[in-house]
Amino acid sequence: MPDRNCVVFVVDDEVVIAQTLAIILNQAGFQASAFDHPEKAIAASVELTPALLISDVMMPGMTGVELAIHFRKTHPECKVLLFSGQAATADLLERARAEGYDFDLLSKPVHPADLLAKLRT
């Protein structure tokens, strides 16, 4: 069972997805917060450092890969898990790898059991 102090930020421009994943994680014992804009997660991280960032890749304004890189730079201890349902994600991940960043990726839609299994490994 996860530590109740394990802070998780869930970021998805689709509010229902972000909130649903946060509810599932909270019920599983995490301290999860949902954000519908990457900038909101960045602002929240000034006061509360997450142990894990879970983010959609394709979002308007800032991609999840850009957000993940930001978190790796500002909070190097923060783990990152990305999810996406779009094929364009591969190009973004390739560019991130070329810059030295490697992120795990789950396919969207994310089944709660798959998400929790991934977090436990």
Image (tube, rainbow, N blue to C red):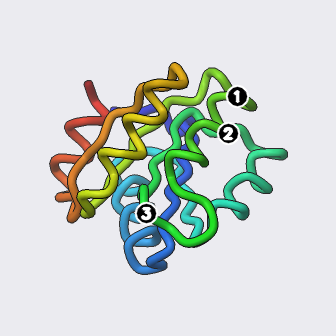
In-front residue for pair 20/96: 96
Q: Position of residue 70 (x, y in %)?
A: 67, 39
Q: Secondary structure at mark 1?
A: helix
In-front residue for pair 120/102: 102
| Residue shown at 45% from the left, 48% from the top | 54
Q: Amino acid at mark 1?
A: Lys
Q: Secondary structure at mark 2?
A: helix
Q: Are marks 1 and 2 in contact (CB under 8 Å)?
A: yes
Q: Amino acid at mark 2?
A: His
Q: Amino acid at mark 3?
A: Met
| Residue shown at 35% from the left, 45% from the top | 91
Q: Secondary structure at mark 3?
A: loop
| Residue shown at 55% from the left, 72% from the top | 60
Lower position in the chain sequence, tag 2 or tag 3: 3
39 displayed left or right of 119: right
Q: Position of residue 16 (x, y in %)?
A: 41, 80
* Residue indicated by mark 2: 70
Q: Marks 1 and 3, how far apart in space?
A: 20 Å
| Residue shown at 34% from the left, 60% from the top | 24
Q: Position of residue 47 (x, y in %)?
A: 83, 46
* Residue indicated by mark 3: 58
Q: Marks 2 and 3, how far apart in space?
A: 16 Å
* Residue indicated by mark 1: 73
Kindly give the residue lying farthest to the right in the view shown: 46
How packed mark 2 is, by other alpha carbons closer than 10 Å (few <14, some 14-19, many 20 or more), is few
Residue 105 drawn above or below residue 23: above
* Corner quadrant of residue 108: bottom left
How packed mark 3 is, by other alpha carbons closer than 10 Å (few <14, some 14-19, many 20 or more), is many
